[in-house]
Amino acid sequence: MSISKLLLLCVFFTITSAQAEDGSYPEKNDDGEFSIMNSLSDLGLHNLKDERWNIYSQATYISSFKQAFPAAYTNLNGSPNSLLPNSERSFTATFTSYLGLKAWTGAEFYAAPEMISERPLSGLKGIGGSIQNFELQKNGTSSATWYLSRVFYRQTLSLGGEKSDVNSGPLQLAGTVSSRRIVFTVGTFSILDIFDKNSYAGDLRQQFLNMAFLTNAAYDFAADARGYTTGLVGEYYFDTWAFRFARIAAPKDPNALPLDYNILKYYGDQVELEHKHVIKGQSGALKLLAYRNHENMGRFSDAITAYQSDPAKNATTCTGYNYDSGNSSAPDLCWARKPNVKMGIGINMEQGITEDIGLFFRGMVSDGKTEVYSYTSSDRSLSLGGLMNGLRWGRNKDAVGLGYAQSWISSQHATYLNMGGIDGFIGDGKINVKPEQLVNIFYKWHVISSSWLSFDYQHLNNPAYNSDRGPVNIYGVRVHFEF
């Protein structure tokens, strides 16, 4: 099936059918599948309406298979970042526990130890904004690795307004919350725990598998190689409006694990304005998000100029932080890194259509001048689609979803890649530039209490923005447990 036909199918599907369980907002989180705290409550050992503490866990296994695909060239002239054209298998296995503790009035403490084991396709190279499994990390191995993904303090100051219930959940203690409030969060977390959330494309352990639906692909949010950071977030809620600001730590080197904690020198700033609304009895939200990173990163034009002025400054000779390219006839960002600014602005929309149908859209434009520092190789991106739960066929904890995503790179980025340069994820040695396009279809089957089995199909056109390679078909299976 051609990409144009798949896109038409996607648009038709999003208009006629789609939804997911709404868990984006504290007052609406009613995920009833977490059973440990419910069981303790039934025994009279825990107050599930006004919690002093809670603990939840999840375990997820995702297996992916990539078919062999056509490619005019692979890793040309020693540039090492191509998606390999042979068939491959990939997997991730994760386990996370979420611990919450309520202290004085409005004060909450959270921690989340986590484990991952993984094997990516082609060493996690050769795909731009549409990496097929959102769980993949840049430094993961097939051996289990344990770490503390989150540990933070959250303080809520009530300013009045209407009271609503907050249900028990991961990183969320049950109680009540005022519609007008100020919230401060400080510690280690994922910025996506707070920013750019979407009911229908955000919780990818229950929804789409592709990273293009986790957030805007062009949102190069500051984070370590696992996707976490340390910093401060401030939020102001006024009824249906919310404003958020965050300053967070950036990695010391692009796509690396160690963070630079001097957030007065190198940092990522983001602001978000949100408005929630109801249309014909169905809830929705509109969000505007902007980010500005100040990091030690290379501009594509500077890398090209350095190479053209002195060919000895190529991808094989730099002794600073680099991606081990073997292309001696190519420029390299290693020669161009200095304090630079990267900015982007995006939109995030969601809308319930009926009780069981919901749609989403995201779009973002980044400046495209500098290298990818923390997220995917994308300078502009959009994603859209929808979900429908199984209410209509008597299985309301099942869900089916169909999404479309597209990413672009800037002209400077394309020129750099066409000269044989590489960034953190892509670089075939040459490029015939086209947008990277993805269609993702999945069905989530609720097997037994707190357990789901999902089947996933992805069709990827122009991997790494290169029409000389692909298309690629990727099949996935996800097993997910919550307890």
Image: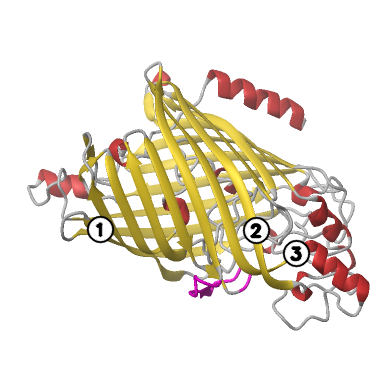
- Would residue 83 be seen by someone viewing this image from the given angle? yes
Closest to the observer, 61 or 427: 427
Q: Choose mark 2 or mark 1, whichever is in front.
A: 2
Give the amino acid type for the residue marked by disc 2 in the picture. Answer: Lys
Which residue corresponds to mark 1? Answer: 100
Picture coordinates of residue 408 (x, y %)? 74, 45
Q: Residue at x 62, y 73 (%)?
A: 253
Q: Is residue 13 above or below residue 456?
A: above
Task: Give the CA distance from mark 3 to mark 2.
Answer: 10 Å
Question: Which secondary structure lies at badge 2?
Answer: strand
> With 131 as the anchor, is 448 left or right in this view?
left
Please give left or right for residue 416 compared with residue 124 in the image.
right
Give the alpha-carbon distance from disc 1 to disc 3, as whole Å.
42 Å
Q: In this rendered view, identify the residue nearer to me: 219 or 74.
A: 219
C-alpha distance separating marks 2 and 1: 35 Å
Magenta segment, which residues?
253-265
Residue sitting nearer the eye, 142 or 414: 414
State the residue position of label 3.
Answer: 299
> Would residue 57 be found to the left or right of residue 437 on screen?
left
Q: Give me the disc on residue 342.
A: 2
In the rendered image, residue 387, in percent from the top left (x then y), is placed at: 50, 30
Disc 3 marks which amino acid?
Answer: Arg
Q: Secondary structure at mark 3?
A: loop
Residue 356: image quadrant is top left
N-terminal label among 3 and 2: 3
- Give the residue displayed 15% in from the left and 43% down from the top: 49
Q: Is-magenta flag for residue 260?
A: yes
